[in-house]
Amino acid sequence: MLYDQYRGYALKVVFRYIYNYEEGLEVTNDGFVKFFLNIEKFRWDEDADIEKLLGGWIKRIMINTSIDLLRKKMYLPEIGGIPDHFWEIKDTGSSADQALIYKDLISQVKRLPPSYRAIFNMHVIDGFSHIEIAEALRIPVGTSKSNLQRAKQLMRNYLNQKEELTECSI
């Protein structure tokens, strides 16, 4: 039941880092194996929102499993893509408007070079500090900061291009 409930959410987290569909599915499944092997370590307070805590824990596992693969591949760009039917996988935590915005944002993030993409995802979307990013990716903190600035500039350029295209087509 947990797998079925969180599968769509986990896939979307993984696909922010891994852009190859088959590898993304494999990373997601590996992440769930880690999740189920370590589920006895999951702790919560009686007053806590267990669903949010569980979702956060799954998110962290999926991010770390994705980063492990990126490190193993030495951040080589992925070849392939995410099929359109992926966006139809049910994610119980998002409305239709949020899903469209999310899909558009992720399509722009996917244009970033792999190392910039990982840092952008970790800092901007997932809320990691530069110290946490540096430890996870085994890079200096300064590299994390400079790559984030470059990624943000590229995102601004991408979004400005998209805006110009939209204005021209109207």
Image: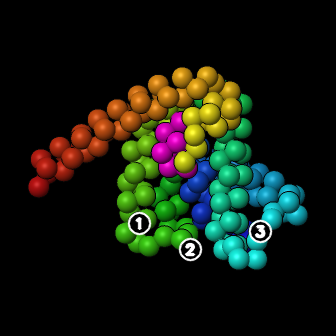
Report the magenta residues as a range. 118-126
Residue corresponding to mark 3: 44
Q: Quadrant of the N terminus?
A: bottom right
Mark closest to the chain's N terminus, 3 or 2: 3
Q: Earlier in the sequence, mark 3 or mark 1?
A: 3
Judge the density around disc 2: few (<14), some (14-19), many (≥20) Cα neighbours within 10 Å.
few
Residue type, mark 1 in image? Gln
> Mark 2 highlights which residue?
92
For label 1, the residue is 98
Q: Position of residue 142 (x, y in %)?
A: 54, 23
The spot of residue 134 in percent (x, y) is 63, 30
Q: CA distance from mark 3 to mark 1?
A: 28 Å
**For residue 162, side relative to residue 19 (left or right):** left
Secondary structure beneath dot 2 equals loop
Viewer can see residue 114: no
Identify residue type, mark 3: Trp
* Label 3 – label 2 distance at C-alpha: 21 Å
Q: Residue at x 39, y 44 (%)?
A: 108
In the rendered structure, which disc, 2 or 1, sits on the residue that comes first in sequence?
A: 2
Q: Residues within 10 Å of mark 1 (few under 14, many from 20)?
A: few
Q: Residue at x 11, y 55 (%)?
A: 170
Q: At which x and y percent is residue 50?
A: 70, 73
